[in-house]
Image (cartoon, grey):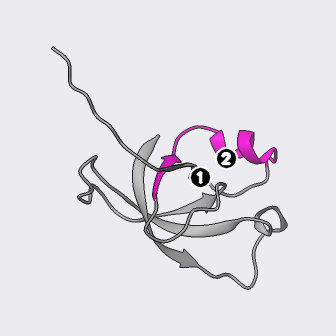
Amino acid sequence: MILCKVTGTVVSPVKKPELNPLKLLVVQPIKPDGTPDGADMLAIDYCQAGIGDRVLVAVEGDVVKQVTGSADVPANTIIMAVVDDLDITITK
């Protein structure tokens, strides 16, 4: 999973039936300090995230199929959690 910030929404008048109940959001990978860390991606919103939210996005494997319960969902990125707070502790 990677840390991202929601930067926009996608409106699609026609999409596969498996995607109908789900929102599509544009997410920007970020570093823990909030600075950008990669190209924007399109992700299925599974957590009612909104623009400006920090989120955890799963981008590998069959996570989308496992979470949605459908093998027909044509996506490989999904928002799994909204991050309310981030606390990083470095120990030596």
Residue in the picture at 53% in, 40% down: 60
Q: Please report contact status of discs 1 and 2: CB closer than 8 Å, yes or no.
A: yes
Rendering coords of residue 31 (x, y %): 27, 49
Q: Is residue 23 above or below residue 1?
A: below
Residue displayed at 47% across by 40% down: 1
Considering every residue shown, the one lying at the far bottom of the view is 13
How many labels, in total?
2
Callout 2: 10 Å neighbours few (<14), some, many (20+)? many
Horizontal side of 32 relative to 8 (left or right) equals left
Q: CA distance from mark 1 to mark 2?
A: 6 Å
Kindly identify the residue that appears in the image at 28 percent across and 46 percent down: 32
Residue 64, label in figure: 2
At label 2, the amino acid type is: Val
Q: Secondary structure at mark 1?
A: strand
Q: Which mark is residue 41?
A: none
Rendered image quadrant of residue 65? top right
Kindly identify which residue carries mark 1.
78
Instruction: Say which label, 1 or 2, has the lower sequence index.
Output: 2
Q: Is residue 85 left or right of residue 48?
A: left
Comparing 7 with 61, the one in front is: 7
The vertical placement of 23 against 46, above or below, is below
Q: Residues within 10 Å of mark 1 (few under 14, many from 20)?
A: many
Query: Going by the image, does 43 lie left or right of 17?
Result: left
Which segment did they paint magenta? 54-71
Residue 89, given in percent of the width and then of the height, sits at: 25, 28
Residue under the image location 68 percent in, 81 percent down: 12
Classify residue 52 by image quadrant. bottom left
Horizontal placement of 80 versus 15: left or right? left
